[in-house]
Amino acid sequence: MQAYLRAPRAQFAQLGESWVAFSGVSGETHVLNTESVALVETLDEHTPRTAEAVAADLALETGTPVEEMTAMLSDAWPMLLQAGLVRVCGSTACDPA
């Protein structure tokens, strides 16, 4: 099962209605929405989590149905990976090194 880690040195700051994110991996800055920032903030740099676990936690926190939260986050994963804010891991038992 595929899991994800927060990329090292990822930093966030709110800028009006949006967020600015700096990737320590790519050295680039990106503008994100609140949902994307919440997704990354549920991740840890060392303990991998599945997309399903992240969606379940955020659904519980916001009172949104899990299926709806999963759909809302589905487009965010590829963008966050490409931006260098999230790293993919082969399984929840992977070595994050």
Image (cartoon, grey):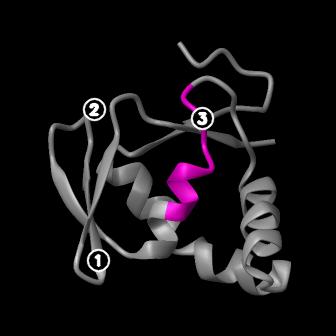
Q: Earlier in the sequence, mark 3 or mark 1?
A: 1
Secondary structure type for disc 3: loop
Q: Nearer the viewer, residue 40 or 26?
A: 40
Q: Nearer the viewer, residue 76 or 54?
A: 54
List the single residue furthest toward the left. 28
CA distance separating discs 2 and 1? 21 Å
User: On screen, 95 above or below 58?
Assistant: above
The residue wearing badge 1 is 18
- Which residues are the magenta region? 38-45
Q: Badge 3, how many Cα within 10 Å: few under 14, some, many 20+?
A: some
Q: Badge 1, how many Cα within 10 Å: few under 14, some, many 20+?
A: few
> Is residue 70 magenta-colored?
no
Q: Amino acid at mark 2?
A: Val
Mark number displayed over residue 44: 3
**x 26%, y 42%: residue:** 23
The residue wearing badge 2 is 25
> Is residue 42 magenta-colored?
yes
Residue 39 image offset from top left, x and y in percent: 57, 60
Q: Earlier in the sequence, mark 3 or mark 2?
A: 2
Horizontal side, residue 75 vs residue 50: left or right = left
Q: Amino acid at mark 1?
A: Ser
Secondary structure type for disc 1: strand
Horizontal side, residue 17 vs residue 93: left or right = left
